[in-house]
């Protein structure tokens, strides 16, 4: 980890997701010793020092639906300084520790940085952390699907799956979905959401869907790798200067079926809301992606049987991804302060899962 001085000194106090940028800026940039102190974990023991509020400007990045991310940019980049030009500060959404193991997130972030696959982690505070900024432009669902860009993403995903050893040999998505179902809220915080919740959420139905998908997955030999698990468009950064892609935001990363990572990525071609399921990639596009992915991961040209087998698994995990993020959205609907219609998102993902199951049974 680089021994440079960051803009804040960490403490046990939390930043609030709803804080206006004008309020957060002096907290983060001016002398904030009362707000931050070093997190006593091995990879974040550096001593952090405050700098003046004139050193960085700050903007709020609005793409995320789990956390709030603040982009701190040096005002004067011409004067030599040990400080980085850009720092990101991630503030966890309320109750997201129910969904994400935050200690594991930081461990994985540091592991990926050591492999050259993530930006440096600079330190953490009680409900977030500071880390490096990946230069480039976030993809959109449309640009992500462009053939040249898709091939780059496939190759980078193959590189990641080959470079980072899984932390366990188990497919984790099924247990995680099961745990989320058991912690589903029993009500919503307001009447409007409560009416929708009471109409569309049936935990027993979700358990049955999970059981069916898990049984179907057992028919395949599970290829467990270290997965990103959240390759939506905004987490894929295209660096025009280098002509490369990078992945960011590894908070959901874990050991999982390789097919889940690919299927989940394909689902993200459809966007976040309203979800356009017709944008899911064609079989030809999937085949091109899978071929490039396998060639990069195994450094050899895949045969037709290997490609066909992975495509079958992707079709199954396409449904698993819908259930995964559908259940996730119910929990977010109860606790998140981010302006997003999580219950509608759940309804769309659940309906698509049922359509896929009916199509497979026909």
Image (tube, helix red, strand yellow):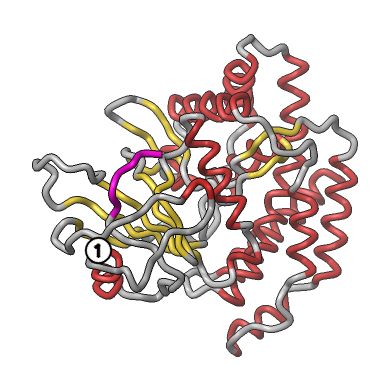
Q: Secondary structure at mark 1?
A: helix
Q: Position of residue 180 (x, y in %)?
A: 73, 64
Image quarter (top left, top right, bottom left or bottom right) of the C terminus: top right
Question: Which of the 4 image quarters holds residue 158?
Answer: top right
| Mark 1 residue crowding within 10 angstroms, few (<14) / some (14–19) / many (20+) | many
Q: Per the image, is 27 magenta?
A: no
User: Which residue matches tag 1?
Assistant: 29
Eyeballing the image, is 212 above or below 201? above
- Whether residue 262 is visible to the viewer of this picture, yes or no, is yes
Eyeballing the image, is 38 above or below 315? below
Magenta stretch: give its range: 1-6
Q: Nearer the viewer, residue 32 or 270?
A: 32
Q: Nearer the viewer, residue 241 or 208?
A: 241
Q: Residue at x 27, y 28 (%)?
A: 241
Q: Position of residue 246 (x, y in %)?
A: 43, 34
Q: Nearer the viewer, residue 237 or 321?
A: 237
- Whether residue 17 is visible to the viewer of this picture, yes or no, is no
């Amino acid at each position: 980890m680089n021994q440079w001085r960051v803009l804040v000194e960490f403490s046990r106090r939390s930043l609030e997701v709803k804080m206006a940028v004008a309020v957060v800026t002096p907290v983060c940039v001016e002398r904030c010793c009362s707000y931050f102190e070093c997190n006593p974990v091995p990879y974040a023991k550096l001593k952090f020092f405050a700098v003046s509020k004139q050193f960085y400007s700050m903007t709020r990045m609005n793409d995320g639906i789990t956390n709030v991310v603040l982009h701190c940019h040096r005002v004067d980049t011409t004067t030599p300084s040990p400080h980085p030009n850009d720092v990101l500060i991630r503030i966890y959404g309320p109750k997201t520790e129910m969904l994400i193991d935050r200690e594991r997130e930081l461990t994985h972030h540091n592991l990926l940085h050591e492999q050259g696959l993530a930006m440096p982690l600079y330190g953490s505070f009680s409900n977030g952390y500071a880390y490096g900024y990946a230069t480039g432009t976030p993809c959109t669902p449309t640009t992500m699907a462009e053939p040249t860009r898709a091939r780059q993403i496939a190759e980078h995903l193959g590189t990641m799956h080959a470079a980072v050893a899984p932390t366990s040999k188990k497919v984790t998505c099924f247990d995680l979905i099961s745990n989320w179902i058991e912690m589903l809220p029993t009500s919503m915080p307001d009447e409007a959401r409560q009416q929708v919740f009471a109409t569309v959420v049936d935990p027993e139905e979700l358990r049955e869907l999970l059981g069916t998908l898990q049984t179907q997955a057992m028919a395949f030999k599970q290829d467990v790798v270290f997965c990103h698990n959240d390759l939506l468009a905004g987490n894929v950064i295209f660096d025009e200067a280098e002509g490369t892609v990078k992945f960011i935001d590894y908070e959901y990363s874990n050991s999982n079926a390789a097919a889940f990572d690919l299927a989940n990525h394909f689902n993200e071609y459809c966007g976040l809301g309203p979800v356009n399921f017709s944008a899911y990639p064609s079989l030809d596009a999937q085949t091109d992606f899978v071929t490039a992915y396998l060639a990069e991961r195994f450094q050899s040209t895949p045969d037709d049987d290997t490609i066909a087998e992975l495509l079958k698994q992707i079709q199954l995990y396409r449904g698993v991804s819908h259930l995964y993020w559908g259940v996730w959205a119910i929990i977010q609907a109860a606790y998140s302060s981010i302006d997003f219609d999580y219950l509608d998102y759940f309804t769309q993902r659940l309906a698509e899962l049922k359509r896929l199951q009916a199509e497979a049974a026909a």
